Amino acid sequence: MKYLTEYRDATIARPLIERIKRTATRPWTLMEVCGGQTHTIVRQGLDELLEGAIEMIHGPGCPVCVTPLEQIDKALMLAARPDVIFTSFGDMLRVPGSDCDLQQVRARGGNVRIVYSPLDALEIARRNPDREVVFFAVGFETTAPANAMAVWRARELGVPNFSVLVSHVTVPPAISAIMQSPDNRVQGFLAAGHVCAVMGWTEYEPLAMRYGVPIVVTGFEPLDILEGMLMAVQQLEAGRHIVENQYVRSVRREGTPAARMRVQEVFELADRKWRGIGEIPMSGLRLRPEFAAFDAELKFGLGDVHVNESSECHAGEVLTGKLKPPRCPAFGTRCTPERPLGALMVSTEGACAAYYHLAKYRESGDPAAAGAVS
Ligand code: SF4
């Protein structure tokens, strides 16, 4: 399979691993920002293979995991309304809110539909003019262009019964917050290739300089990640700290200008709370005032909501690399993918889910238990 199997070739991976070990004169601590990269690292055991040379800290790059509880609870309120068709990507349906999840609201009669694109949600709105259709617009810079496009199209087509519940976050302020944390241990970052495919990497350059950390734009397959690790370690050993691009087959320095332009047209920067982490200044996107008619929070008068966060879930510590999932007291016992206490156990990009499926794989020997092991 072009662009897949050649990036999972063990005969190339082994010498790369040896090269990283030979290059590292001391153990280095790197953070992969994206949950997709976390799953590859854990599933392929790259962290174990590189023990002593690199310690990987799993970053807050799972969009489902960092969606604040307030927004989940607002989604639940909207989904329960009889006049609303609530649409979302499938990952959000089992994320626990204060009292229940979207799947439970659907079981009680809520009209909750899984869509694969916000434009599908807009189409549902066009076909159901007598109902309000709300799309749950979550994610990082990767999903923002399509969500911006749906809002822009809704205005162009004049679809008054379409709106979005926005919970967008952006990566660079999170990198700043991690580096400014007093107990930070991160010495280098693997930046998420798909985020940079949209936004480019110019925003990362001042961060690399200000905090003295290498940032390597990296893909998602095992060889991508090993190469990104090697590039970061080479920089650290040489005392350099610049942005480099491992993912040259997909990412250009300027990203995708048309997508960036549409995002900037529809959204503006805003303070945003991250679940488990708290508020990070100017780390999110909200609709610009000219698109206020499509803002579900304004349309339905959703103000502040009182939330009830599980005291058992250590998501914040996992998302900032202070706790590895198996060390959470609830891991695999009171918290499983079937009965999750936190989003990290249910999301396909969640770190806790990655470790849980790997543990099941090791117990059973069945590759399917670990997800798509190649
Ligand atoms: S194992 Fe479950 S309870 Fe523990 S941090 Fe992960 S999601 Fe939260």
Image (cartoon, rainbow, N blue to C red):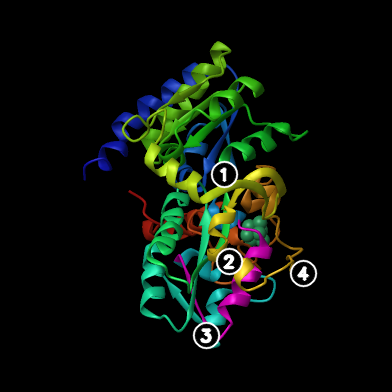
Q: Nearer the viewer, mark 4 or mark 2?
A: 4
**Does residue 142 appear left or right of residue 343 in this picture?**
left
* Disc 4 secondary structure class: loop
- Residue pointed to by mark 4: 306
Q: Is residue 193 above or below residue 131?
A: above
| Outermost residue to the left | 1
Residue 359: percent from left, percent from top: 52, 55
Distance of mark 1 from mark 4, alpha carbons? 25 Å
- Residue pointed to by mark 3: 107
Distance of mark 2 from mark 1, alpha carbons? 28 Å
Q: In the image, which residues are magenta?
A: 67-89
For the residues labelled 4 and 3, say whether their Cβ atoms are less than 8 Å apart. no
Q: Which mark is residue 170?
A: 1
Q: Nearer the viewer, mark 3 or mark 2?
A: 3
Number of numbered discs: 4
For the residues labelled 3 and 2, say whether their Cβ atoms are less than 8 Å apart. no
32, 135: nearer the viewer: 135
Please tell me which residue is depicted at 37% across the width and 33% down the height of the picture: 251
Distance of mark 4 from mark 3, alpha carbons? 24 Å
Please tell me which residue is depicted at 53% across the width and 77% down the height of the picture: 103
Q: Tell me the amino acid under the disc marked 1.
A: Thr
Q: Is residue 298 magenta?
A: no
- Residue pointed to by mark 2: 336
Who comes first in sequence, dot 1 or dot 4? 1
**Does residue 128 appear left or right of residue 72 in this picture?**
left
